[in-house]
Amino acid sequence: MTRPSDEQFRALFEPRGVVVAGASTHPGKFGFVALHNLLASGFGGRVLATNREGAEVLGVPSVPSIEDLPDGCADLVFVCTPAAANVDLLRACAAKGIRAAFVTSAGYGEAGPEGRVAEDELVAVAAELGILLAGPNGQGVVSTPANLCAQIVAPYPPAGRIGVASQSGNFVSSFLNYAVMTGIGISRAVSAGNAAAVTVPDYLDFYADDPATAVGLAYVEGVADGRGFFERIRSVAARKPLVLVKGGATSGGQRAAASHTGSLASDDRVFDGAVHQAGATRAATVEEAFEAAATFATQPLPRGPRTVVLTTAGGWGVVTADAISRGSLTLAALPDDLRAAVDQKLPPRWSRNNPVDLAGGETRDTIPEVLELIASHPEVDAVIQLGLGIQSNQARLMRTGPFYPDHGLDRIVAFHERQDARYAEAAASVSDATGKPILLATELAVASPDNPGPAGVRATGRLCYASANRAVTALDHLWRYARHRQRHER
Amino acid sequence: MPDPTTATLSEADSKALLARHGVPVLDERVASTPAAAAEAAAAVGFPVVAKLCGDAIAHKTERGLVRLNLPDAGAVRAAAAELLAAATPDDGDVAVLVAPMVKGNRELIAGLHHDPQFGMTVMLGLGGILAEAIADVVFRLVPIHREDAYDMIDELRTQALLGQFRGEPPVERDALADVLLGLSRVAIDEPSVRAVDLNPLIVVDGRPLPVDALVEVAR
């Protein structure tokens, strides 16, 4: 099956107007929530609504049926009406020039044999009318370039470059919540629902050509046609990084998936091999998947596996070295000329090896200068930097303690906070200048997100990782993807 | 339970089919009499292994139809006579397969398997008696390219076993990739093949050699 046309996808993701079919005056109903979210996200196009009584909802004057709307007023219909009404609804929508429908209504393939008949009819009618049919039984669609939040759940995420497609609506919400939490934003997000006509690989295929999207992020549970799925994701991964998380990897999970989406399970190791062969990367958990995608969206790809750990304290460096050695990355041997150059910046007690442990030897400019030396070296492919935010954490205690601002505390607090913000900026600018990934990790990213260290990382548009291990895992995804491209695209 | 829609080839026919597609196999001979077996053994070099071989014989070891480490012509003649006498009417046409006795501390497995959703797959894994418990196996979909074969080798968790090991040289990655690429070619060129098991592939001086092979074809 071929995917919908670019024009149809534009009607879904960049509509000039949206009709909410089945808008409700009851704030607990999907027909109300969908309209609310659409209006609240600041969508710039026309917003229209149908309601059987023609009632006004949230200030939008509705009409009893689609036939009452002006021709060409909308490209997308968001369908909240009962399944039985939807075939006629689609025909009326096509007559008005609508090219895409997101059907949130339930009562289709998930509801047994009768529902499957209704679903098949809906698919056939949409195909005949040339309407892109998203869903049914899906949560909705988000498109930040269009300020579009046509979905029956929160949140509306910050704008960014991750394109989400999911076989399960809840995972869309999870990924969007991570986007809100981290500030690493979303370009498009869609829950495929029953994926009766448009499937997760179809959306990913569109993202692969979508200038607003840098990386695809998908949740899949089961695939009906494994070979077809493989060819599609291989084609996507040849154009853009693609991170997959799959449910049903264990026999317990497979039984749950069979009752959720009715999909047959393959041997998970075969699925795993197919994903790697396709050049996509696979994450074990939802947070790992989001962080991998966020890293693809905000860091350059490493050109090799040689990683240096830069730390202000010993123990962190040791644990990070362990994590690096367990995966596909390598702990770079510190080149002699780099060691000599770092020697000029530090007292003799520094580690003199990788991890580069500054051992408290830093003065005002040491951290940015040493980072630049390391990242600029041709035998270093990536840097993981630890220790950000320590100074500001002390500053916070001083600022909220009983002695502030006396005894010089006001000046030292300001100095500490300036330094951490500076380290965050330096990491981003050195990364940009060298074209190498530089990942900053500290638990303060979640323990104290307003700390000028992690807040500074966020201000540069990058992710501050909650632990060194999570930074290593994300970087590992980037290197495996980069290595696959190097090996397979000569 | 045997699958009624498939049939197994004899070990000799299995290996001949694999060799035609570039899967490296040992220099082996088929003999129908004890005297011919002794001649074959002299040709491949002592010591040798003798096995009873036939289309219907899949579980030789369980039935005691494998004789290892035969040092001279007399031993081969005696073993071959016993093996031929052990054949039952159900075994159909049988012969004795004579192969050089190879030794190595490391065993791998490789093969072709049909997945209900992804179709034919090439498999590589750790072999030996602990293989099932360790379950270190990787798959790729047919066809594979040489880079895919290298990826498979890299993806085995037990990488230490592929390096220098107990005084033996590292596993030759190119030679192992040749086995996997040969399997992929078998799947493409022989549509009747349903499954292949190379178990074990013994690593001899760094080179993986299939000492047993079983090809399953559609009836």
Image (tube, rainbow, N blue to C red):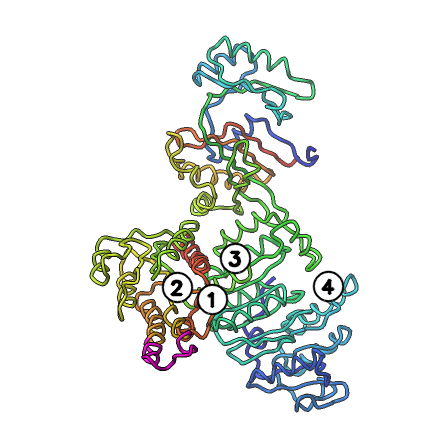
Amino acid type of disc 2?
Leu
Q: CA distance from mark 1 to mark 4?
A: 32 Å
The C terminus of chain A, quarter of image: bottom left
Q: CA distance from mark 3 to mark 1?
A: 13 Å
Q: Which mark is residue A110?
A: 4
What is the secondary structure assignment of the residue under circle 2? strand
What is the secondary structure assignment of the residue under circle 3? strand
Q: CA distance from mark 4 to mark 3?
A: 27 Å
Q: Residues within 10 Å of mark 3 (few under 14, many from 20)?
A: many
Comparing labels 1 and 2, the label whose residue is closer to the camera: 2
Q: Which residues are magenta?
A: A397-415
Q: Earlier in the sequence, mark 1 or mark 4?
A: 4
Amino acid type of disc 3?
Ala
Q: Chain of mark 4?
A: A
Q: CA distance from mark 1 to mark 2?
A: 12 Å
Q: Chain of mark 1?
A: A
Q: Earlier in the sequence, mark 4 or mark 2?
A: 4
Q: Compared to B107, does A485 lie above or below?
A: below
Q: Where is mark 1, residue-wise?
A: A294
